Amino acid sequence: MKTAILHPWFLMKGGGERVVDVFAEIYPEADIYALFVDKSQLSNVLQNRRVTGSKLNSIPWSSKLHRELMPLYPWAVESFDLSCYDLVISSCGPSMMGAAVHQEAVHICYCHTPQRSWWDLYAEHQAQLPHILRELFVAGCTYNRIFEFCAIQRVDDLIANSLFIQHRIQKYFAKQSVVIYPPVDTSRGYIDSNRGDYYLYLGRLERQKRVDLLIQACNRLGRKLIVVGKGAEAGYLKSLAGPTVTLLGYVPDGEIGPLFARCRAFLFAAVEDFGIAPVEAQSYGRPVIAYGYGGSLETVRADSPDDGCNTGVYFRSQTVEGVITAIEEFEAAETSFSPQEIQLHARRFDTSVFMENFKRHVDEVIRRR
């Protein structure tokens, strides 16, 4: 079958882009389409593939202004000529489910999350804007919500990347979906007997990641914390960091493994749709101390007295005090965590599992059609 893969943009290398890489491996002859394409950000998997940008991609500085161009996304998505494809797979970000496909084509949407800025975080984003821009934001969001709701009704099959997102899809789109967890490369994980005395955070340094809570908690407890990543909050977080907190910035992939393998535990305070970093930490046999909400409830096992196989600890309030309580709870039971059991749990989310489940599901959808 002639196949097309759609993704909102290739402007960074994140979890969504990793999913597209795996789609491209499953369907090596597929063509790739995106609203915005920065070729320097394409992975090795996509470097020699046909990747087509939308008409918005030709706008000067579009890679920096892509969020301001959101009201034009529906027009840009529908401008793609997909009439020759039998199978269309949309890695669903804003408006991507609205692709106009041939009547006989099968359109499968893998939904990372409904666009948060105009669905569940709409009020929060609106409040952060200057008054002069709020009315424009409201108008743009209203149009995009109507477009997305109507467009997703035409999709032949809808896949959610977690139970958390499955619930959000049902709430906002009134649409049933199946859950296939996204791919995580757990094969690189190993168990290191040389343990450090530090906690670890790895990810983007953005406000919604709540790294400030982790830093303040470790400041107050006097615990060592290593923070890896870049982002808009980097300067602010450096100003919060006490003598036991180290911000390393960007760390090459080849140097991340030892940081994972030797940490006491991985700290995670964000509300994530799924959350790849906690799974990566567990692939090295390390426990996770996570906010007990969102995707973490599916990737981290805690409070499991039946079989005793816990892979971490939850904190129930997204506050400094909540993090402190969870760290103290973890340290009281630190020796009870089994690195081998934690690593085995992480392998449930391996890339090979995703590839098998996704390909089998797509084949079944095509067979039904």
Image (spheres, rainbow, N blue to C red):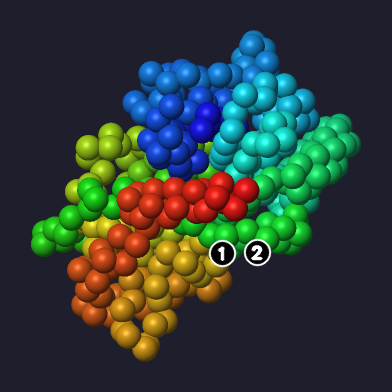
- Say if residue 241 shows up in the picture: no
Residue 341: where, in percent of width, then height? 24, 71
The residue tagged 1 is: 163
> In what element is the residue under mark 1?
helix
- Three-letter amino acid code at the position of disc 1: Leu
Please say if 356 is above or below 92.
below
- Three-letter amino acid code at the position of disc 2: His
Q: Residues within 10 Å of mark 2 (few under 14, many from 20)?
A: some
Q: Residue at x 36, y 71 (%)?
A: 312
Camera-side residue of 220 and 63: 63
The reply, left or right, for residue 35 in relation to residue 246 is right
Please say if 120 is above or below 228.
below
The residue tagged 2 is: 167
Residue 169: where, in percent of width, then height? 68, 57
Camera-side residue of 80 and 126: 80
The reply, left or right, for residue 38 in relation to residue 143 is left
Q: Quadrant of residue 198 in the image?
A: bottom left
